Amino acid sequence: MTDSAGKKIQLGIVLFPDNTIQDLIGPHQTFAFHGETHLISNVVGPVRSDSGISLVATRSYAQGLPEGGLDIVMVPGGQGTFAAMQDQELIAFLRAVGPRVKYVTSVCTGSLILAAAGLLDGYKATTHWKYYDLLETLGAGKIECIRGQRVVMDRNRFSGGGVTAGIDLGLTMLAHIKGQEAAQTVQLLMEYDPKPPFDAGSPLSAPKDIVDKAEAATKVVMEQRMHTARDIARRRFEKT
């Protein structure tokens, strides 16, 4: 992606162990037609995803931003989200970078990491449908969680829903920055024309027994994660 001056838009994606690759591949592929992606983590080198495949971080937090800076910083989600929320080096990096980029963005539970860093205070945002309550808990009344939307835009904050919403996020941002024609062209080149085999991609459309099974399968871990979210929010707001 290029701006009006013909410069490539610089996208920085934060990598942490047990990220969900699809969260970041969607936005990356959308911007890759005209931009440059930097994968940033604690150290340069392979970072294992929650599906077992590794991506290679090209910059470390300590190295800071690439020459010329970043236009967008994006945070994915994944099984490692709650460890990432408590990674002080990652949180410090986001707090330092947030005011220096044009857009602060997330996909899926990446919004929880932004919330833990204080970068969603005073903004509307969304996340994976299982984590709406946790996002509100982390915000302690300072974050308005928008439920049931694939993409939420509030000023320079863009957040996507669960996993596959990353493609929608990328196209929405591309339309915002470069116009609808550019976004539609990329959508066509990607052949993004989803026709899912089942109408089960949302708790509003999935059969009730499927929703019940998903809720039951995640009940214990969600209770643990809510406890963590409350603890992070308590510690964050005790300091302010």
Image (cartoon, rainbow, N blue to C red):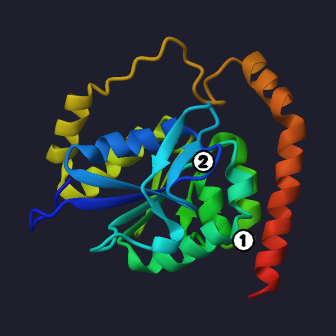
Looking at the image, the residue that sits furthest to the bottom is 240
Which is nearer the N-term, disc 2 or disc 1?
2
Q: Which of the 4 image quadrants contains residue 148?
A: top right
Disc 2 element: loop
Q: Position of residue 219 (x, y in %)?
A: 87, 36
Question: Foreground: 121 or 114?
Answer: 114
For residue 81, side relative to residue 239 (left or right): left
Write down the residue under mark 2. 77
Q: Nearer the viewer, residue 103 or 34?
A: 34
Q: Position of residue 105 (x, y in %)?
A: 46, 59
Point 14% across, 45% down: residue: 181
| Residue 204, quarter of picture | top right
Vertical relation: 197 (above or below) 67? above
Please provide percent x and percent y for residue 39. 44, 54
Point out the image quarter for the C terminus. bottom right
How many tags in the picture? 2
Q: Which residue is mark 1?
A: 141
| Residue at (30% x, 42% y) in the render | 30
Three-letter amino acid code at the position of disc 1:
Gly
Q: Is residue 219 left or right of 204 when viewed as pictured?
A: right
